[in-house]
Amino acid sequence: MLYGYAGKILWVDLSTGALRDEPTPAGIARDFIGGYGMAARILYDLIPAGADPLGPENVLAVLTGPLTASGAPTGTRWTVACKSPLTGGWGDANGSGFFGPALKLAGYDAVFFTGISAQPVYLLIDAGVPALLPAGDWWGLDTYELEDAVKAKYGKKAEAACIGPAGEKLSLISGVVTAKGRIAARSGVGAVMGSKRVKAVVAVAGSGGIPVPDAEALKTVRDKYVKQINDGTGAANFYKTTGTPGYTAFGVVVADSPIRNWSESPDAFPDPNKVGHEALFALGRKKRTCWHCPIGCWGEIPLDGGPDAAHQPEYETGAAFGSNLLVDDVRMLLKSNDGCNRLGLDTISAGATIAFAMECYEAGLIGPKDTGGLALKWGDGETVLEVLDAMGRREGPLGELLADGTRRAAAKIGGNALDYAVEIGGQELPMHDPRYEPGLALIYQMDATPGRHTQACQYAGGPAEWDATEGFPGFGQQREKQVGRGHYMKPFSHLAHVMNVSGLCLFGYCSTTATLLSEFLSAVTGQPYDMATVMQCGERIANMRHTFNLKHGYNPLDQRIPWRAFGRPPLERGPTAGFTVDIDTLRREYLEDMDWSQDRALPSAAKLRELGLEDLVADIYS
Ligand code: SF4
């Protein structure tokens, strides 16, 4: 009995329409846990080097983890994994909401799509029974319309993970959307789903549960960690009261939020409270929560006071469409977020790409001929909405120019346009500034999915000898202390990997002690996961994703650094004035800790063998 898992994986050959069940592989489940860990192990063998990310050789995986729908507080997450068309290397993204639990309770731990369908289709899994069906009129719908169509056809229990117009048009900055706004946004996963002509995966939970070894013992663990959340451990109270919008104004003040395409200090965005949580919630926020989550960090807000509600813009969106574009109208933020969700666009990359376009326009690199006559002006929220819609639908000259993000747009524009593209490895940086917290720079460059802020606890500024059983050392930027800082990334990224692949939400992880992972994984799976085992699983997953990248010719050391965001040259004013990230030192420390070579980031053979990845040795060293 494979406790903690639904026990089955569904393989869908889109080229033939054939469906096949396989037992969830117990060894991979034990060593890679679930989510992108399991996907990396399986896809490493399946996707050949050089495969076109938008071609039939790419494989799209939709996965859960053992803590998804397990009773673990915030165990709501689901993951999409594939070769990324944005970076050319490993790609993954995860979302919350209701879809992950529905997929698992519908009887499957994961679905793997191979090949390409001749016609648009959707996959229905109704209480354990899968069917591949023609998408028909659903192709072309935005994600809200699709969600409504699914509920109308299959009832309220049906949960859909779908692409919008952006994914259909193969926008490389598109994601997979559930519940009209809980989106797996990064790595261009929406484009891969669109390339396979899969409009949606629809899951209807059955009446059975997930087998666990001892339900009473599991309840005891759950009670312990729900109590931690209720007692306000870590960031619990922040997530329960304001959620991430509570950071939007603060992030500007302390200079964590990028301003004017990362070129300015906080004085260029003088009234951040206009886009802060109080201004946003004054529009009439109704608090919402994901599947059985005791935190409930998000909410819905009426659009223009009408009956339609939109998801609240989270911090990342607030900064991407607020300070980074100099838009200080909170209603525009709400509409921009709503537009991204409907179109199925990654809000981080979309906002960053519009900021890039504004600076190119200002510099005269593009003009009215390229924009369809639109004048791109900082702070002009109405124009932002027009650009967003064109991008998401790949319509008109500007839509075609920007639909694939900053790197592709810069290549088309030419000249020095790349100087204005704040991306790494092809993916736009999230809204946390390495000049504020230099550890971010290391994560942005060295994670297998570059430019991600959820792959380690970037704010850790605590003691060098950190004990995972004592919880997190807390926030403390101490940005001047760069020597020694690179040593934080290894333990924190390993924990983040296990958190992500388990199906746990980052906000739950930040609202409890880290021992939640070991105690819940043990209680749910019946396997002995102590913290050392958890760390080793994280390290195995990190090496697996990284080696996938090396196989596909993506080396993090070869990537162009967005120097503007790393403080070269430094800002002249504001809290981070004069500061430059010492990326060489940070990277050297991390490579040393990981036992990866300093010159090519190659994992040592001894390390791979220690992690049970013997088969990768020959691939790297042949
Ligand atoms: S903390 Fe927020 S995003 Fe995470 S599971 Fe709970 S409600 Fe969802």
Image: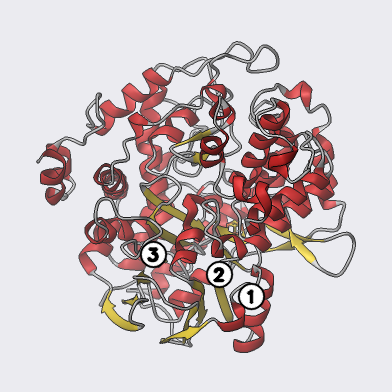
Q: CA gap, disc 3 to disc 1?
A: 20 Å
Place of residue 400 in the rendered image (x, y in percent of width and height, measured from the top left): 61, 50
Query: In the rendered image, which residue does mark 1 sit on?
Result: 146
- Amino acid, disc 3: Leu
The answer to whether residue 106 is seen in the rendering is: yes
Q: Residue 162 got which mark?
A: 2
Q: Earlier in the sequence, mark 2 or mark 1?
A: 1
Quadrant for the N terminus, please. Answer: bottom left
CB contact under 8 Å: marks 2 and 1: yes
Q: Within 10 angstroms of label 3, few (less than 14), some, or many (20 or more) residues?
A: many
Please identify the residue farthest to the front as the structure is shown: 369
- Amino acid, disc 1: Leu
- Quarter of the rendering containing residue 276: top right
When the figure is inspected, residue 379 is found, relative to residue 569, above or below; the finding is below
Is residue 28 shown left or right of residue 375?
left
When the figure is inspected, residue 273 is found, relative to residue 214, above or below; the finding is above
Q: Within 10 angstroms of label 2, few (less than 14), some, or many (20 or more) residues?
A: many
Q: Residue at x 41, y 73 (%)?
A: 216
Quadrant for the C terminus, please. Answer: top left
Q: CA gap, disc 3 to disc 2?
A: 13 Å
CB contact under 8 Å: marks 3 and 1: no
Q: Residue 60 got which mark?
A: 3
